[in-house]
Each structure stands twice: as structure tokens, then as C-alpha cells.
Image: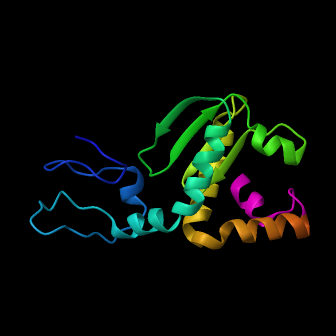
Amino acid sequence: MRMLGAFQSRNTTVRGGVAQIFSKKLCVTGCDPYDNFDIIIIMKLLINIPWTILGFLAGLMCLVYKIKLDKRGFILIFVKRLWVTEIFLKRRTYGLTLGNIIILSQYADEKTLIHEIKHVEQFRKMLLIFPILYLYENYKYGYKNNKFEIEANK
């Protein structure tokens, strides 16, 4: 029985995705050596819960047509339009990341997905403070010169 990303049933190994990002492993008492899960990833997922909940709610406010749990530990929400951000930005938006949630509009392509995955990584590096730093950069330098956008576009 498979559960959220880094968790799997007994006698199966965790391969690829989230489990390879960090190397510190923790084995729960009485488990096989192959039943390892990564405590650091679990903690990062838990710490970002406020932003993840906000992202999930923002995704649900749009016209959702698909929700997918990715093995790397984030949730993809596919929507018709990201009207939540389009109202404020006054332009078409292809993707939005909040915590461990990536919301993609019907106009998004693979390049947009890769860009948004980099924002998930930024959320995991800077945890709760990332959105504040991002908004400060946007306010001070503008969207195109925002260092987090430049990093995500590489």
C-alpha cells in the first residue's frame, strides 16, 4: 500500500524522488533496513504546512480538473485558469507555488512545471520565510529582476 511520497509499505524500498534529495535516514524501531524514511523531508513538509494549506485553498478556488501527488513530495493541482493571481497581476498566470503545492493553469507547459518545482525547492530551503523574502524582492526590484525568479528560470 503506497502512501504520501516518502512513505511506503514494508518490504519495499524508497527509490527516486524525495528520498534522494537528502541523505540522513531514520529507521523506525522494528522495521526493515529498506523501510527507511527521511526525517528531514518530513520536517520540511510539516513546517511548510501553513503555506501548503493556503496553496491548496487557492487551488480549490480555481476550476480544478485534476489533482496529482508527485513522488517528490509536492501536490500538483491542475486548473483551467489561475484567476486568483490574475486579478492582482492583471495578466495571464501559468503557475503558482505555495508551500508544497504547485498550481498549474491549462496554459502551463513543461518549462512552467520545472520553474515551479524550483520554487518548491526554494520553499524547502527557506521554509516559512520564503514568501516574505520573495514579496520583498518583487517590491524592491520587480518581477523580472527578482533573484528568486532568476534562479527559478535557470
Where in the figure is residue 19, as x and y percent of width and height?
36, 57
- Left or right: 65 as drawn, with respect to 71: right
Where in the figure is residue 86, as x and y percent of width and height?
83, 41
> Which residue does the image show at 75% across and 66% down from the upper left?
134
- Left or right: 138 as drawn, with respect to 116: right
Is 152 one of the magenta-colored residues?
A: yes
Q: Is residue 104 visible?
A: yes
Is 36 one of the magenta-colored residues?
A: no
Residue closest to the eye, 60 or 7:
60
- Left or right: 28 as drawn, with respect to 45: left
Residue 33 drawn above or below residue 103? below
Magenta extent: 142-154
Image mark count: 0
Residue closest to the eye, 150 or 86:
86
Residue closest to the eye, 87 or 118:
87
Residue 98 drawn above or below residue 81? below
Residue closest to the eye, 90 or 33:
90
Where in the figure is residue 8, as x and y percent of width and height?
25, 49
Q: Is residue 154 visible?
A: no
| Quadrant in the picture for the C terminus | bottom right
Q: Quadrant of residue 65?
A: top right
- Left or right: 37 as drawn, with respect to 90: left
Where in the figure is residue 129, as x and y percent of width and height?
65, 73
